[in-house]
Amino acid sequence: MSLLQVREVTRSFGGLIAVDRVSFDVHDGQIKAIIGPNGAGKSTLFNLLTCFDRPDSGSVLFEGRELFGERPDRVVRMGVARSFQNTQLFEEMTAHENVILGTHARSGSSFTPAALRLPSARKRDDLASQEADRLLRLVGLESWRGSLAADMPHGLRRLLEIARALATSPRLVLLDEPAAGLNTQETTALGEVLYRIRDHGATLVIVEHDMGLVMEVSDEIVVLDRGCKIAEGPPRLIQKDPAVIRAYLGEEDADEL
């Protein structure tokens, strides 16, 4: 069975259909990309998959359980994490502290044991600190452990947000434009991080404009255009798909290829 099953998902805003009966599967251990021109419905679909928005119709099953109707925090505890197109870090906290916060998001731990410094809270804090260090190493930020998020370069902030998402121990990680604003060297490093995350047991879905990164790391790609899925398959087929070429280049330019 697929880890994530998206079936006939539709979302409209007034008279505009942003996502139109989109269906696809994500299998355990995959890196799956969602691409499309500006306005294709990618961000709306991402918000639907993580319950930051509600669909007009359709279904999304994660490990066989319906996600629609759940609160975003409940979706995190079910094992689905996400990053955002614009980094949302706690600027005056260190990289290590930002990742530790992610562990609390998954556990939903009570404030009282921590406030009273009970042994259970101290043990949990120690484990959270160790896990934060492991994740900082995973994304290559161990040397920035004590740095304030506000002082970190843009590319490293992207990696820190990914580490914080991983701190919730997700089975499925959705990354919204992880390469936005990165230079070539930073994008190459990001690709290596995505492979390491997959190799450590997480499944990835990424919305991304950087076609070089998408073609390099993706097992499969879903292509959206004006809210509709127009293609799905491995990168080598997507690159040659006439509908995809037309969506990105337009009819006249596509006919000249």
Image (cartoon, helix red, strand yellow):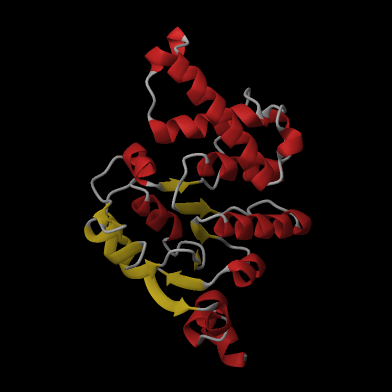
The answer to whether residue 61 is left or right of residue 156 is left
* Residue in view at x 36 percent, y 37 percent: 73
* Residue in view at x 65 percent, y 31 percent: 95
* Residue in view at x 36 percent, y 54 percent: 49
Up-down: is 208 above or below 108?
A: below
Measured as percent of width and height from the top left, residue 170 is found at 45, 47
Q: Who is closer to the viewer here, 151 or 195? A: 195
Measured as percent of width and height from the top left, residue 82 is found at 47, 47
Measured as percent of width and height from the top left, residue 31 is found at 52, 65
Up-down: is 73 above or below 10?
A: above
Up-down: is 4 above or below 78?
A: below
Count of numbered marks? 0
Quarter of the picture containing the C terminus is: bottom right
Q: Is residue 244 visible?
A: yes
The answer to whether residue 43 is left or right of residue 150 is left
Determine the residue located farthest toward the bottom in the rendered image.
Answer: 256
Q: Quadrant of residue 147?
A: top right
Q: Who is closer to the viewer here, 88 or 13? A: 88
Quarter of the picture containing the N terminus is: bottom left
